[in-house]
Image: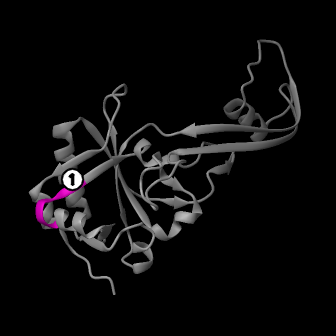
Amino acid sequence: MPSLYKYSENRWADLLLSDGSVRIGTIFDFRRSEHKRGIADAAEGVKSIYHGIEYYNSNESSGIDRSAVANLGPFVSKKGGGFSLSNLTLEREFKSPDAYVHCTAHSLSKDVLEQFEGADSCVEIVRPSAFYKHLTEVINKIVPVHYYGLHRIVYSARREAFNGENFGRRPDLIKDPEYELQCEVRAIWMPRSKCKLIAPINIHEKALVKFCRKAELL
């Protein structure tokens, strides 16, 4: 896998390169307005799906309208009964469960650096697969997690038209187009405990240093 790049203030880059210091954030934590520009996102992990209906009859209609009513609508049809709808839009909100995340970029560029308020340095993760394998082992010593892998963020509207088949991309893999220059790649860990509240984790693991080096921005 090609290198990934972590943009940050110089002090945090130095700690990663010297001590293997890594902050693992969470989906819900990114929603906090206290974070700096480029990190805070009130809509993190949220999207909606909509579908417009001109006319629908539960006893006759089929295709995408029937699928939308079944998957997006609040309607319950009693046995033997029926109903009709006309000139309305069905819409349903989807929210990702909270998860641990570590964000990098797939591009080395000053344009990316400038997306993050206060960032003046960049660390190259030269062996991402090995880096995240070891990081997962460390996290599991603190809290049991399942590593969901590395994913490139898709930059698109958070309000999607229903495709008739499924609910599309996971909300935690979507960001608004205004963030597109961040070129984000997101590592995700799902907590194994469904009930436990989670919070960011600060890790200090010297073994991570061997996977990192200072990146020079030309």
Residue 184 horizontal side relative to residue 2, left or right: right
Q: Is residue 196 above or below residue 184?
A: above
Q: Which residue is under mark 1?
A: 133
Q: Which residue ends up furthest to the top in the rendered image?
A: 79
Q: Which residue ends up furthest to the bottom in the rendered image?
A: 218
Residue drawn at x 17%, y 46% is 137
Q: Is residue 63 above or below residue 173?
A: above
In front: 19, or 45? 19
**Is residue 170 at least partly visible in the picture?**
no
In front: 56, or 161? 161
**Is residue 10 at least partly visible in the picture?**
yes
Numbered disc 1: secondary structure: helix
Q: Is residue 21 above or below residue 57?
A: below
| First to last magenta residue range | 17-22
The C terminus appears in which quarter of the rendering? Answer: bottom left
Residue drawn at x 32%, y 74% is 120
| Residue type at numbered disc 1 | Lys
Q: Is residue 19 magenta?
A: yes
Q: Residues within 10 Å of mark 1 (few under 14, many from 20)?
A: few
In front: 203, or 105? 203
Q: Position of residue 190 (x, y in %)?
A: 35, 40
Residue 1 horizontal side relative to residue 98, left or right: left
Q: Is residue 126 magenta?
A: no
